[in-house]
Structure formats: C-alpha cells, structure tokens
Image: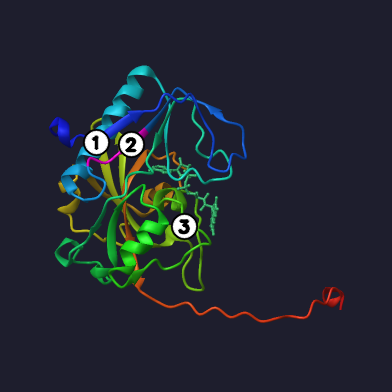
Amino acid sequence: MPPDDLKPNFQVTGHKQWVNWHENFKPQPLKKLIDVWNVRPEESRIEWYNAATKGFQEVIADALRRGDSMRAIGGGWSFSDVTRTDGILLNTRPLNYRFRIDHNQAHPGYGGDASNLAFVQCGISIADLNRYLRNKGKSLKTSGASNGQTIVGAFSTGTHGSALDVGSIQDYVVALHLIVAPERAVWLERASQPVIADTFPSMLGAELIRDDDLFNAALVSFGCFGIIHGVVIEATDLYYLQAYRRLMPLNLNYSRK
Ligand SMILES: Cc1cc2nc3c(=O)[nH]c(=O)nc-3n(C[C@H](O)[C@H](O)[C@H](O)COP(=O)(O)OP(=O)(O)OC[C@H]3O[C@@H](n4cnc5c(N)ncnc54)[C@H](O)[C@@H]3O)c2cc1C
C-alpha cells in the first residue's frame, strides 16, 4: 500500500439512501455510500491512480467478507434506477485523472494516430474531458446536449450523441481497466483492435485480455461488470460545428397531405 499521505480517500458518507441528481425516482435504501477522492485531484500521476485501484480492491474485499452487493455511480444523472444496489454505492465522480498516451505506449498494430488517444479516470466529466482535449487541439468525436455526465456513466448506458459516421461515446472507447476482485484487475481491449502496448497494463497491475466479445459485453454494461476505473478513448482533431437556424412556416396540416 502507498504511505498514508498518498492513500486515496474512501470517505464513508453515512448516507443510508441515495437518489439520482434529478430526484425522479424513490430514494434507494443502501448500506453505505462511499465518496472516492484521489490523493491529489489537481495532478494526474500513475502511482496515485494505482493507489485508487488498491483502495477499490480493499472495498471489494470488505464487501465480499460481509456479503454485500456493490455498484459504482458516476454523475448520478441517469433518469432510471440503473445505479440500484442495496449494498455499497461507490461515488466515482471525483476521480478525474487524465493521461496522454505516448507513441511508444501504443500497440505496434494500432492503426490510428496515437496523439488521438487519452487514458482517463472513470469520473472525469464530459465537460472536463472536453476542456482537456481542446487544449491539445482535439475533440470528442460526438457530443450530446449537456456535459455533467462522467465518461464511464455515459458509455455504460450507451448515451451521449451520435453523428453520421460514429455512434455515441461507447463507439470511441477502445480500452477498459476493470477492477474485478480483491486481487485482480483486467485491461480489456478488442482482439481485432489492439491499442496499447503489451507493457502498459502491467504498469497498472492489470492482466491483459484482448477479446472482442468480452470487450463488447463489458462496454455497455450498466455497472454490472465490476468497477471500470479507467478507459482509453480515441479522440479526433478539433472541429467546428456550424449551426443553421431557419424560420419555418407553422403549417399544422402539412402531415395530412
Ligand atoms: C440534463 C441531462 C442531459 C442529458 N443529455 C443527454 C444527451 O444529450 N444525450 C444522451 O444520450 N444522454 C443524455 N443524458 C443521459 C445521460 O447521458 C445518461 O443518463 C448517463 O448514463 C449519465 O451518466 P452518469 O455519469 O451520470 O452515470 P450514472 O447515472 O451515475 O450511472 C450510469 C450507469 O453507469 C454505471 N457506472 C457509472 N460509473 C461507473 C464505474 N466507474 N464503473 C462501473 N459502472 C459505472 C452505473 O452503475 C450505472 O449503471 C442526459 C441526462 C441529463 C440528466
């Protein structure tokens, strides 16, 4: 374990129920709501990211000992109760680290431009991610209407925008770092689309698996596939969207023609 001053803060809030941001369903009873904070939120470092992984694994071990169920939440913006658990709810929203992928960290068989790749922690909001990418002259391939969702919450439910040639966020997620057990974490990619050099997952203490079916199953999995700690997204060059508005005559009869 990291020394005490480098341990992430897993803060048990004392709340025994939880409701989504927009309060449109009944509060869910639960045993514990835990807010997860990085060691130093303002500075992204792999050793602190790894410390959060260890923290997740301790919580999983404790939940297994007690027989508690567990689920992660992101922004809490989903309108349905897809975040439901009667056990432990882990609030991952404060986890906002972001890392660039150097060319030598990309897989030799990766067919894209490595400067478009970013490795980000699960709780980073779409707003924060947009700002990070913009400073690099990059952009998400598509966007939805608002930006308070977290990256993992948004693609775990298959949401947030689409365009003519690309679907919503899950279509440009290319690697997942899943915490699945007290002693096990997995780096998951598609076999048909290797992205990261084989040495990268070991830096995170993760086992490398390349499997299309497994990757596709874990991608839009509504929080049921373990804790997704980090993901690699594939961005694109910054682009400009032109918006057009046109006044249309209001003709209530047009559909009956
Ligand atoms: C104001 C508003 C505007 C919206 N605009 C759009 C839009 O324009 N386009 C669109 O498509 N959708 C839109 N949505 C819907 C929104 O994108 C989805 O509800 C999205 O799932 C919310 O993301 P979240 O981070 O709040 O996730 P949450 O609601 O917190 O969680 C969603 C799911 O992800 C899982 N999850 C979250 N984090 C993790 C993790 N670290 N590991 C494993 N599982 C995890 C949860 O268990 C849950 O099953 C909007 C919603 C609101 C409230």
Residue 79: horizontal and vertical position, in percent? 58, 45
Q: Quadrant of residue 198?
A: bottom left
Q: Main secondary structure of the magenta part?
A: strand
Observer-nearest residue: 244 or 220? 244
**What kind of residue is marked 2?**
Val
What's the distance in space between the residues labelled 1 and 3, CA to CA?
Answer: 26 Å
The answer to whether 186 is drawn above or below residue 211 in the figure is above
The numbered mark at residue 147 is 3
Cβ atoms at labels 2 and 3 below 8 Å apart: no
* Residue corresponding to mark 2: 36
Picture residue at 27% right of the left edge, 50% below the top? 97
Residue segment shown in magenta: 35-39
Q: SS for tag 2?
A: strand
Q: Are marks 1 and 3 in contact (CB under 8 Å)?
A: no
In the image, taking residue 4 as reference, residue 253 lies left or right, namely right
Name the secondary structure under disc 1: loop
Badge 1 is on which residue? Answer: 8
Q: Are marks 1 and 2 in contact (CB under 8 Å)?
A: yes
Q: Is residue 65 above or below residue 5?
A: above
Q: Position of residue 148 (x, y in %)?
A: 46, 53
Say what amino acid the circle numbered 1 marks.
Pro
Q: Is residue 206 visible?
A: no
Q: Where does residue 116 sit, x and y in percent of width and height?
A: 29, 68
| SS at badge 3 | loop
Earlier-in-chain disc, 2 versus 3: 2
Q: How far apart are the alpha carbons under marks 2 and 3? A: 21 Å
